[in-house]
Image: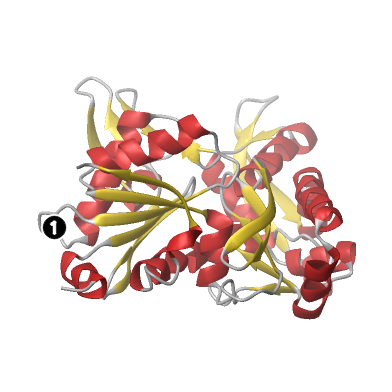
Amino acid sequence: MGLFSRFSLSRDMGIDLGTANTLVYVSGKGIVLQEPSVLAIDKSEKRAIALGTEAKKMLGRTPENVMALRPLRDGVIADFDSAELMLKHFMHKANEGKSLVLPRIVIGIPSGVTGVERRAMMDAAVHAGAREVYLIDEPVAAAIGAGLPVVEPTGNMIIDIGGGTTEVAVLSLQGTVLSESVRIAGDELTDSISQYMKKVHNLLIGERTAEEIKIRIGSAYPTRDDDQAVMEVRGLHLLSGLPRTVILKGPEIRESMSEPLSVIIEAVKRTLERTPPELAADIIDRGIMLAGGGALLKGLDTLISHETGIVTHVAGDPLSCVVLGTGRVLENFQQLERVFSGRSRTT
């Protein structure tokens, strides 16, 4: 039986185990799961009571004996046991509740992680029931998922902005020519809004509210619509200790995110400065590709184009690029085998 057939029968999986969201691709089926990377635990009994979407609803709203947490921080495992439990649950759910037949798994990870962090990710997947684990750097997976011609001898530049990390990479011939990973991404943009609300409005807001502000009226570059965007926000007034409502405007939220956005822009510029001339010429011709949940921030493509002078495109489905890339690697395993950055077997 050929390699293709074994993959189809074993229902192997491609996983984007992200700081904010986890997506699972099952060979032969496509993307079957997309849920927040959140776990709710009963502290007294030390067991999971909710995962994914249900657990995210509990963030900031749990009683004393329940803790809602994110097992990953900055794209890597912060709580090994919780990450393993969450991964096992998502793999089981992606397999429609049927018992797993030791699948092969391809997982996207940030390119800047350490050897210890890579090993922790592989161990978590093996403990969750994988037979073989392959790691692929997220920018490579995102480029494949976005449809960039990574197999060809041409320069491709991708910026993958997730929840915990921003990955900037130049790719050619299935490999990373150079890359930069900064642990500033969607979470830091959300946090900068929370800090701004405290500092300017003396208002304490939760993570979910800050994220909603970012999605609804946040932007990276001035537009006419942005200047007219307003939002009513409720929180706890720090001076009076009582609930209060304030009206926010788009430009002030853009200003609140300027610092983390400048870190991302500088990483892009540093990568471009180090790019070999031939590949730089390809990138100028083809443009820069934006992927990841952060790509959905209004005006970010315009900001990057303005700062670099290179046309920037947003991938068709930026949230799914990494997991689509892992899936395409699974289904074209022999052709794309060189893209892996780590491998682990149980036997």
Looking at the rendering, in which quadrant would you find the C terminus? top left
Q: Is residue 151 above or below residue 34?
A: below
* Location of residue 51 in the rendering, given as x and y in whole percent from the top left corner: 30, 45
Q: Front-most of 70 and 241?
A: 70
Left or right of 141 in this view: 291: right
Residue 157 in percent (x, y) is at 70, 65
Residue linked to disc 1: 97
Side of 102 where 236 appears, left or right:
right
Left/right of residue 121 with respect to residue 6 in the rendered view? right
**Is 6 above or below relative to 343?**
below
Taking the spot 59% from the left edge, 77% from the top edge, the residue there is 149
Q: Percent from the top left, x then y, of residue 195?
A: 71, 35
In this image, 261 relative to 96: left or right? right
Residue 227 seen in render: no
Residue at 75% x, 78% y is 286
Q: Position of residue 106 (x, y in %)?
A: 37, 56
Q: Nearer the viewer, residue 323 or 276?
A: 276
* Residue nearest the viewer, comparing 115 with 292: 115
Mark 1: which secondary structure? loop
The three-letter amino acid code for the residue at tag 1 is Gly
Q: Residues within 10 Å of mark 1 (few under 14, many from 20)?
A: few
* Residue pictured at 58% horizontal, 58% vertical: 139
